[in-house]
Image: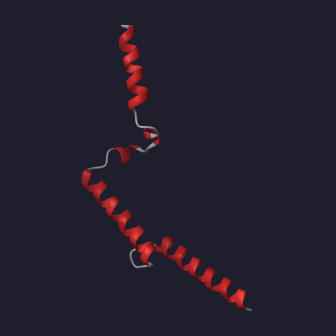
Amino acid sequence: MSGYSIDKLFWQQHLSKPGWENVPVEEKHRTHEEKKKLRRDQRLRIHARKTNNLLILDNDERNAIVDAKLKKLLSKRQGQN
């Protein structure tokens, strides 16, 4: 009996995914199609940020990029004066 508990502890400690218990239940049980769609959306967002294509991004991300560009322009102008 003691060998069983040691084996069980070994499997729990070494083969469990770290941090998986903190993931919400909805994320654990997503279907394959949902996961594919999420990955595609993430790829599109990364590509949009790299190419500055503001149409793909949602409002918060779009505003953040525009704010960063404005700050950059203002700092350049202040440096010239």
Quadrant position of the C terminus in the picture: bottom right
Q: Tell me where residue 44 sits by quadrant.
A: bottom left
Residue name at image x 42 percent, y 21 percent = 9
Q: Total marks drawn?
A: 0
Residue 70 percent location from the top left of the image? 60, 83
Q: Is residue 61 above or below residue 36?
A: below
- The residue sitting at the top extreme is 1
- The residue sitting at the front extreme is 80
Q: Is residue 47 above or below residue 30?
A: below
Residue 59 percent location from the top left of the image? 47, 74
Q: Is residue 9 above or below residue 30?
A: above
Residue name at image x 68 percent, y 89 percent = 77
Residue 73 percent location from the top left of the image? 62, 85
Q: Is residue 53 above or below residue 15?
A: below
**In the image, 54: left or right of 78?**
left
Coloration of the structure image: secondary structure
Q: Tell me where residue 50 sits by quadrant.
A: bottom left
Residue name at image x 39 percent, y 14 percent = 5
Quadrant position of the N terminus in the picture: top left
Residue name at image x 37 percent, y 11 percent = 3
Q: Tell me where residue 7 sits by quadrant.
A: top left
- The residue sitting at the left extreme is 33
- The residue sitting at the right extreme is 81
**63 or 11: nearer the viewer:** 11
